[in-house]
Image: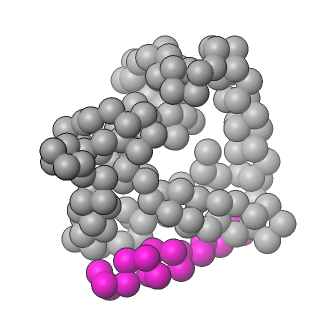
Amino acid sequence: MVPQPLWNTNLRYLLTPKKWQEIRKHELKRVTDAEYRYRCEICTRPKESLDCHEIWGYNEETRVQTLNGLIMLCKQCHLIKHIGFSTGLALENKCNFDGLISHFCHINKLTPADFYEHYLEEFAKWEERSKYTDWKQDLKYIIESHMELF
């Protein structure tokens, strides 16, 4: 879960819409199979559309959020990656939280109890990280991996 001080500081908001779409298209080409179908990089199911998700690492000592990669995800896998956001959507009846739990458990071969244990661990990390407002971002990955687009 992204610490609250870093909300809306992802690539989609930091780059121009045109540049973000160029990166997304580049990533879509990477996950298109021989039959020209897109496949989610987590559940591997073919999908008509995929979201480009940023993989972030966190150093609590230096309070640096580092972009480590990009991954193409189906809507369900993407909502699981943003489980805090999904919780809010579920409270507004805008997403099927039980369906997300089921998807998570199926992919990871876990029980709902395992999911909730993981959820509580992630929420505790989020709470601790969100106490600090002096987070910095390391975006070297995007420049190095997509240099031809810049």
Please tell me which residue lies in front, 80 or 91: 80
Q: Quadrant of residue 28?
A: bottom left
Q: Nearer the viewer, residue 134 or 1?
A: 1
- Point out the image quarter for the C terminus: bottom left
Asked whether 85 falls inside the magenta stretch, the response is: no
Colouring scheme applied when the structure was drawn? one colour
Asked if residue 104 lies left or right of residue 48, the reply is right
Rendered image quadrant of residue 62 = bottom right
Q: Is residue 3 left or right of residue 18?
A: right
Q: Residue furthest right?
A: 61
Q: Nearer the viewer, residue 109 or 122?
A: 109
Q: Position of residue 31 (x, y in %)?
A: 31, 53
Q: Is residue 91 visible?
A: no
Question: Residue 22, can we see it?
Answer: yes
Query: Residue 50: percent from the left, percent from the top?
Result: 29, 45
Residue 125, horizontal then vertical, whole percent: 75, 44
Direction front: furthest residue: 34
Report the magenta residues as a range. 133-150
